[in-house]
Image (cartoon, rainbow, N blue to C red):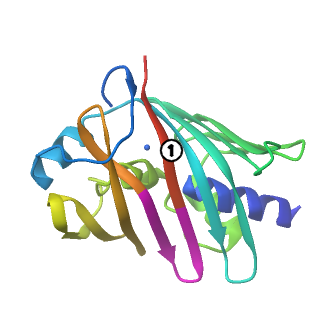
Amino acid sequence: MTGVWRGAAAALSVCAVLSGCAGLRPGSDELTYAERRDRLGMLEAWNLSGRIVVRTGERAFQGRFRWSQRPDDLELVVRSPIGTSVMRVSGPNDNLVVETRGEQRDLDDPEAQLSALVGWWLPVTSFPSWLLGIPDPAYAARERVGSGNTLASLDQRLWRIDIADYQLADDVLIPRELNLRHDALELRVIIDRFDAAP
């Protein structure tokens, strides 16, 4: 049981705008970092999909994921490289349901419960902000701005986030590749598609 939830929680940890379907491409939005941070910080709903690699120091997992975020709830689906469902997480942000391998668990305190299950600190409520290339405004952060007025790295809540590459989505830059690290836990996320919520 513990191994099942350990894999599910590790995948969840990865587990980010505007209108219409965003075509992702290289380029520049010509915004300052502060302007982009404010613009992205106002987004409440989005859909994204991509690829993920999770390394724990002892094990590794790779697959594909789809995340739908709304103001009051989310849905995250993680699949293996061949498309088999590995995990589904859904529900209000403070009361999630995790389904994996035919088992279901209710999490009424997701950060604390997931962290206890896997033995890693998983600040899951901050991941949507990080995936957009901005800090979680609810917590103190150390930011480093790089070329193109984009966030190059972020230290927040005992995690280090390095953003290796960006892409345009509806004329605003969002990350294409992120590397997130806490102790021996490493997550590599590549965003392939970003769609605005209806």
Quarter holding the C terminus is top left
User: Is 130 displayed left or right of 80 in the figure?
Assistant: left
Residue 141 visible in image:
yes
Specify the amino acid type for callout 1: Asp
Q: Nearer the viewer, residue 114 or 4?
A: 4
**Residue drawn at x 33%, y 48% as measured from the top left:** 167
Q: Nearer the viewer, residue 192 or 55?
A: 192
Is residue 162 placed above or below 67 in the rendered structure?
Answer: below
The residue singled out by tag 1 in the image is 192
Whether 185 is among the magenta residues is yes
Q: Tell me which secondary structure the magenta stretch mostly adopts.
A: strand
Q: Nearer the viewer, residue 44 or 117?
A: 44
Q: Residues within 10 Å of mark 1 (few under 14, many from 20)?
A: some
Q: Nearer the viewer, residue 190 or 8?
A: 190
- Picture coordinates of residue 56 (x, y %)? 67, 77
Q: Residue 60 falls in which quadrant of the image?
A: bottom right
Whether 176 is among the magenta residues is no
**Residue drawn at x 63%, y 45% as measured from the top left:** 65
- Picture coordinates of residue 36 (x, y %)? 18, 46
Q: Secondary structure at mark 1?
A: strand
Q: Residue furthest front?
A: 26
- Picture coordinates of residue 126 (x, y %)? 42, 54
User: Is 190 displayed left or right of 143 in the figure?
Assistant: right
**Residue drawn at x 52%, y 39% as measured from the top left:** 93
Q: Residue 119 falls in which quadrant of the image?
A: bottom right
Residue 157 visible in image:
no
Is residue 162 placed above or below 29 in the rendered structure?
Answer: below
Magenta highlight range: 177-188
